Amino acid sequence: MFAGDQTEKELKLLGHPARKRIVELLEAKEKMSLTELRAETGLPVGMMYYHLDVLKELVVQDNERKYLLSKQGRKVFTSLASKEGLRVTNIARPMRFLPGWFFIALERSFSISLFS
C-alpha cells in the first residue's frame, strides 16, 4: 500500500466527528471504558459500538475491557494531529448528537404551522 493510500484511509477513519472525538479522548486519557466513552461523547450504545468497529485498526480493548489506542492508532493520531492541528483540549465537554426522531418532529411541527 502506498503512503498516499494509507493517509487517505486514515482520514476516512477519522472523517466522522464522533470517531475523531473517540481517538482524541483515548489519546488524552489513555484508557476508557465503554461507559466513560459514552458519557464523554453522548452517543447511544449501538452507535458507539459501530464507531468502535470502524476504528478497530486504531482502537483495541485490554483485559479489563477498557479501550485504548493501538500502536497504529497512536501513530495515526500523532500524524494527523500535526497535519490537521488536532488538539486534546476541552476533553471535559461532551459532544452531543441529536437523535433522528428530533428532526422528524421538527419537520412535522414546521409543516403543520406553515400550511395550517
Image: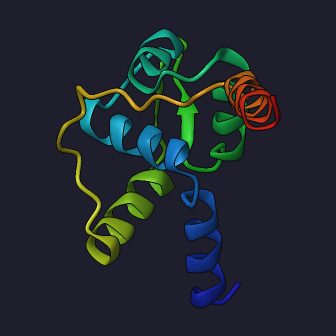
Counting from the top left corner in percent of width and height, residue 7 is at 55, 78
Q: Is residue 65 above or below residue 84?
A: above
Q: Is residue 45 above or below residue 108?
A: above
Residue 71 vs residue 52, the one in the foreground: 52
Residue 88 vs residue 66, the one in the foreground: 88
Q: Is residue 88 above or below residue 26?
A: below
Q: Is residue 100 above or below residue 17?
A: above
Counting from the top left corner in percent of width and height, residue 60 is at 56, 34
In the rendered view, does 30 fall on the left or right side of 116?
Answer: left
Counting from the top left corner in percent of width and height, residue 62 is at 51, 22
- Identified at 72% across, 25% down, the residue is 109
- Identified at 27% across, 73% down, the residue is 82
Residue 98 vs residue 114, the one in the foreground: 114
In the rendered view, does 29 fall on the left or right side of 103?
Answer: left
Q: How is the image coloured?
A: rainbow
- Identified at 70% across, 33% down, the residue is 110
Q: Quadrant of the C terminus?
A: top right
Number of residue marks: 0
Counting from the top left corner in percent of width and height, residue 76 is at 44, 63
Q: Quadrant of the N terminus?
A: bottom right
Residue 30 vs residue 24, the one in the foreground: 24
Name, please, the residue furthest toward the front: 116
